Amino acid sequence: MFLSVADQHAPPKTKRVRQKASPWLTRDITALIIKGDRAKSNAQKRNDSNLWLEYKSLRNQVNKEIKNAKKYF
């Protein structure tokens, strides 16, 4: 009886779990993503325009690599 009342007021949450990892993500792309994350962190901390340009360049490179990897997968 308690569970039915509890489910009405706070229904159980459902979560979707992805079955497999993205097969087009290679180690090179993952390394670029990590490098870009670090560049973004540095740019945010120092607020330097050159660091922001470096981050944007890495971001564009990551997007280009992912797009090419998906195309050839």
Image (tube, helix red, strand yellow):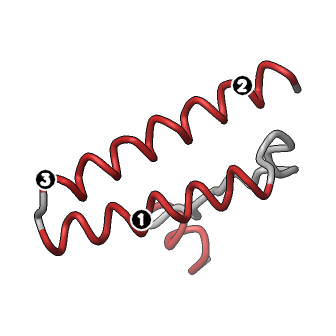
Asked whether disc 1 touches disc 3, contact meaning CB atoms under 8 Å apart, the reply is no
Disc 2 residue type (three-letter) = Asn
Looking at the image, is mark 2 or mark 1 earlier in the sequence? 1
In-image side of 11 versus 66 (left or right): left
Q: CA distance from mark 2 to mark 3?
A: 29 Å
Q: Quadrant of the C terminus?
A: top right
Q: CA distance from mark 1 to mark 3?
A: 51 Å
Q: Quadrant of the N terminus?
A: bottom right
- Counting from the top left corner in percent of width and height, residue 47 is at 11, 64
In-image side of 64 versus 19 (left or right): left
Q: Given this view, does label 1 or label 3 mark the residue nearer the observer?
A: 3
Q: Tell me what residue is drawn at x 69 percent, y 50 percent.
A: 29
Identify the disc placed on residue 49.
3
Residue pushed farthest front?
Answer: 50
Helix, strand or loop at disc 2?
helix
Q: Which residue, given by chain and number where applicable, does mark 1 sit on?
A: 9
Asked whether disc 2 touches disc 3, contact meaning CB atoms under 8 Å apart, the reply is no
Occupied quadrant, residue 59:
top left
Helix, strand or loop at disc 1?
helix
Q: Given this view, does label 2 or label 1 mark the residue nearer the observer?
A: 2
- Counting from the top left corner in percent of width and height, residue 57 is at 39, 41
Disc 1 residue type (three-letter) = His
Q: Which residue, given by chain and number where applicable, does mark 2 sit on?
A: 68
Helix, strand or loop at disc 3?
helix
Q: Given this view, does label 2 or label 3 mark the residue nearer the observer?
A: 3
Q: Tell me what residue is drawn at x 45 percent, y 67 percent.
A: 10
- Counting from the top left corner in percent of width and height, residue 52 is at 23, 52
Looking at the image, is mark 1 or mark 3 earlier in the sequence? 1
Disc 3 residue type (three-letter) = Ser
Q: How many marks do you count on the picture?
A: 3
